Amino acid sequence: MPDLKRKQDILEKAKYRYYYPRLVYFNPEDKKIFCLQDIENNNADWLEKLINKKKETDDWEIYFANTPPSEKIQNQIISEIPK
Amino acid sequence: MRVKEQLEAEVRFRLVPILRSLDPHERFEIQSRVKECESAINALRMRQRGSLFEDDHPEKYSITQLRDLAGIRVL
């Protein structure tokens, strides 16, 4: 459980918000999105590394732990989260 | 429903040795349930990234992927 607490702290400190309908955490300033399933299935280091990683573009990005879903799904998630 | 009945039958069979050794005032009860269809679909959806199904690939999804589609409780 300490990892869960640490992940929550990382997200909170980095000002990520939860969007329940799509089960994702997002930050409108960084334009980054993480799916709850990936956060749960990976450790806090994975999360922290990606949150701190500098993006190459100013576009919204969703970070996945393994095979990403289709672009259609990704675009739908991005279009729905509150900005 | 057949899965539920089969599970119940298997559990009852396994508990026969225990049944024989129960005191008169003791008993056990077996309860079983199959997940409601709507609930199963929602549970499957919640397991997907973004809580979304890919319409173009329905073959990827099956409620048989759920671990709690049928459940047995022994009391």
Image (spheres, rainbow, N blue to C red):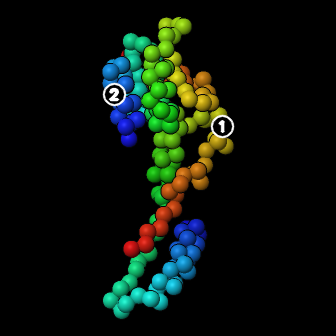
Relative image position of residue A11 (x, y in whole percent): 37, 25
Which of the pair B38/A15 is nearer the observer?
A15
Q: Amino acid at mark 2?
A: Asp
Q: State yes or no: discs 1 and 2 in contact (Cβ < 8 Å).
A: no
Q: Secondary structure at mark 1?
A: loop
Please state if B14 lies on the left or on the right of A27 as rendered.
Answer: right
- Which residue is found at the position 42% from the left and 13% from the top? A30
How many badges with numbers are in the image?
Answer: 2
User: Taking the image as drawn, is residue A21 in sight?
Assistant: no
Q: Callout 2: 10 Å neighbours few (<14), some, many (20+)?
A: few
Q: Which residue is mark 1?
A: B57
User: Taking the image as drawn, is residue A47 in sight?
Assistant: yes
Which of the pair A26/A10 is nearer the observer?
A10
Relative image position of residue A29 (x, y in whole percent): 38, 12
Front disc: 1 or 2: 2
Q: Which residue is mark 2?
A: A9
Q: Is residue B27 above or below residue A25?
A: below
Q: Is residue B75 above or below residue B49?
A: below
